[in-house]
Image (spheres, helix red, strand yellow):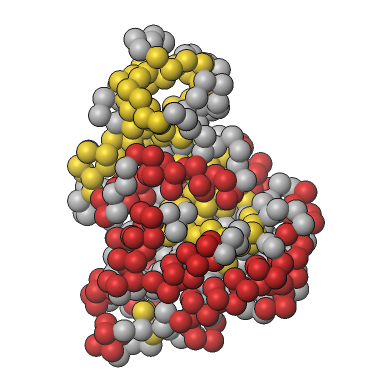
């Protein structure tokens, strides 16, 4: 492997931001200084050089729905977006509820070689919410995040059992906080827009009731608890209060919940159909504030690819989900801009800690693995194409500020200017 220098950037080190070059050799950061030389040079003037992004919430669709996405195409999209590690959700077919399924995903990710692919494990067998999955096997296979994502763990007794088990090991139980009874048949956020459209709706309380229950269970068991795709102001308030009480609680927010409110749904464009739904502007503003003040720990994409026949249908019949790995950093920088330290904390450092990926999310320092994302916060551009197998995104044609200049994984360049290594772009 040839040496690589990232030159002229603002480097996010353990001691703060410094204007410097970064020399990489054999997959490791070997020097931080001025006028460094190497076989390969990437000019980083005006850009930030920090730890590679870590996504806590990626749907790769493999095994079972490879026509939407697979581990190879999803890894390419992740690399294009500055990611060096992603956590693959277990709502595949079959669900990842046993150790051999988790190892399959690890092996496929390793063979692709663009990012570290870490599988999340299901909480319940088949994600049916009736009995615990093979948590012991999943743990032995290296799983550290457990979720029935796509559905809430609605049974409080089952949730307590899972929390009791994971509390003794330090694993994270992550919740898709949407109460199935309150959300049944709901399409969009309950509010003025749903009244205008006459469409069945999902109240904010569907999220908040699940979070409130789970926080009591987390306090009872001592488990590490993580709220996925937080979408309500009340949820932000409960997370802040739980942290004040000293609970081991974290939360993520998606770029689309930061970027859009439910007024976009008034168009009935299925590109804006997600779960939990886009909320009113008051909720969106609370999410942005929670991200800025650190109540919300991490940005997570909830990258959810769907084939055209799942989305190019009337809104009521469309699948939920948006693809987002390639644009997440730019969207955050556009709609909820952060200083460079906070930006990399939310995009890399905090999600790595939650996911249990110790080689990732580390500030740039000599001796650390060379997992890096170079991000130009001033670059203005408009997304027009994707490397994902699916293109169900509202970001095409949207003016964004900030772009990933380069992604470095294990010392190798895995993407430049939005193009992953050896992958053809599709419109």
Rendered view: 123 above or below 417: below
Choose top left, top right, bottom left or bottom right for residue 111.
Answer: top right
Asked if one can make out residue 320 in the rendered structure from this viewpoint, the answer is no
**Residue placed furthest toward the front:** 245
Choose top left, top right, bottom left or bottom right for residue 117.
Answer: top right
Say which residue appears at 39% left-offset and 71% top-offset: 233
Q: Nearer the viewer, residue 119 or 15?
A: 15
Q: Position of residue 295 (x, y in %)?
A: 44, 59
Would residue 206 appear left or right of 217 to someone viewing this image? Answer: left
Say which residue appears at 75% left-offset and 73% top-offset: 131
Choose top left, top right, bottom left or bottom right for residue 128.
Answer: bottom right
Q: Nearer the viewer, residue 276 or 163?
A: 163
Rendered view: 83 above or below 119: above
The mark total stands at 0
Would residue 180 appear left or right of 124 to someone viewing this image? Answer: left
Rendered view: 26 above or below 56: above
Say which residue appears at 32% left-offset and 47% top-offset: 338
Would residue 120 appear left or right of 70 to someone viewing this image? Answer: right
Asked if one can make out residue 249 in the rendered structure from this viewpoint, the answer is yes
Q: Position of residue 334 (x, y in %)?
A: 25, 50
Would residue 307 appear left or right of 65 to someone viewing this image? Answer: left
Say which residue appears at 75% left-offset and 65% top-offset: 164
Q: Position of residue 196 (x, y in %)?
A: 24, 88
């Amino acid at each position: 492997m040839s040496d690589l220098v990232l030159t002229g950037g603002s480097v996010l080190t353990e001691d703060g931001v410094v204007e410097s070059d970064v020399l990489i050799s054999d997959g490791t950061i070997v020097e931080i200084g001025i006028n460094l030389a190497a076989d390969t040079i990437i000019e980083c003037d005006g850009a930030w050089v920090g730890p590679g992004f870590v996504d806590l919430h990626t749907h790769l669709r493999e095994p079972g729905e490879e026509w939407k996405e697979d581990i190879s195409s999803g890894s390419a999209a992740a690399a294009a977006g500055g990611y060096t590690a992603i956590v693959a959700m277990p709502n595949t077919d079959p669900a990842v509820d046993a150790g051999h399924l988790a190892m399959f995903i690890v092996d496929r990710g390793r063979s692709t070689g663009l990012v570290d692919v870490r599988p999340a494990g299901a909480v319940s067998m088949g994600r049916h919410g009736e009995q615990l999955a093979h948590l012991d096997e999943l743990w032995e296979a290296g799983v550290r995040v457990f979720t029935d994502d796509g559905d809430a763990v609605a049974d409080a007794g089952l949730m307590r059992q899972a929390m009791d088990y994971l509390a003794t090991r330090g694993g994270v139980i992550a919740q898709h906080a949407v109460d199935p009874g309150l959300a049944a048949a709901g399409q969009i956020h309950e509010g003025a827009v749903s009244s205008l459209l006459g469409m069945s709706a999902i109240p904010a309380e569907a999220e908040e009731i699940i979070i409130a229950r789970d926080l009591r269970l987390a306090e009872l068991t001592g488990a590490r608890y993580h709220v996925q795709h937080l979408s309500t102001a009340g949820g932000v308030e409960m997370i802040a209060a739980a942290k004040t009480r000293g609970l081991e609680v974290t939360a993520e927010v998606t770029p689309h919940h930061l970027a859009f409110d439910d007024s976009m749904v008034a168009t009935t464009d299925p590109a804006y159909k997600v779960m939990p739904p886009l909320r009113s502007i008051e909720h969106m503003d609370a999410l942005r504030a929670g991200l800025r003040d650190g109540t919300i720990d991490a940005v997570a994409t909830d990258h959810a690819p769907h084939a055209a026949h799942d989305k190019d249908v009337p809104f009521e019949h469309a699948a939920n989900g948006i693809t987002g790995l390639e644009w997440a950093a730019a969207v955050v920088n556009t709609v909820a801009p952060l200083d460079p330290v906070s930006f990399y904390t939310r995009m890399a450092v905090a999600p790595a800690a939650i996911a249990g990926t110790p080689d990732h999310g580390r500030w740039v320092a000599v001796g650390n693995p060379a997992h890096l994302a170079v991000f130009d916060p001033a670059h203005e551009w408009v997304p027009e194409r994707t490397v994902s197998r699916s293109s169900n995104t509202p970001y095409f044609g949207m003016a964004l500020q900030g772009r990933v200049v380069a992604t470095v994984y294990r010392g190798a360049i895995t993407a430049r200017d939005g193009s992953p290594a050896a992958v053809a772009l599709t419109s």
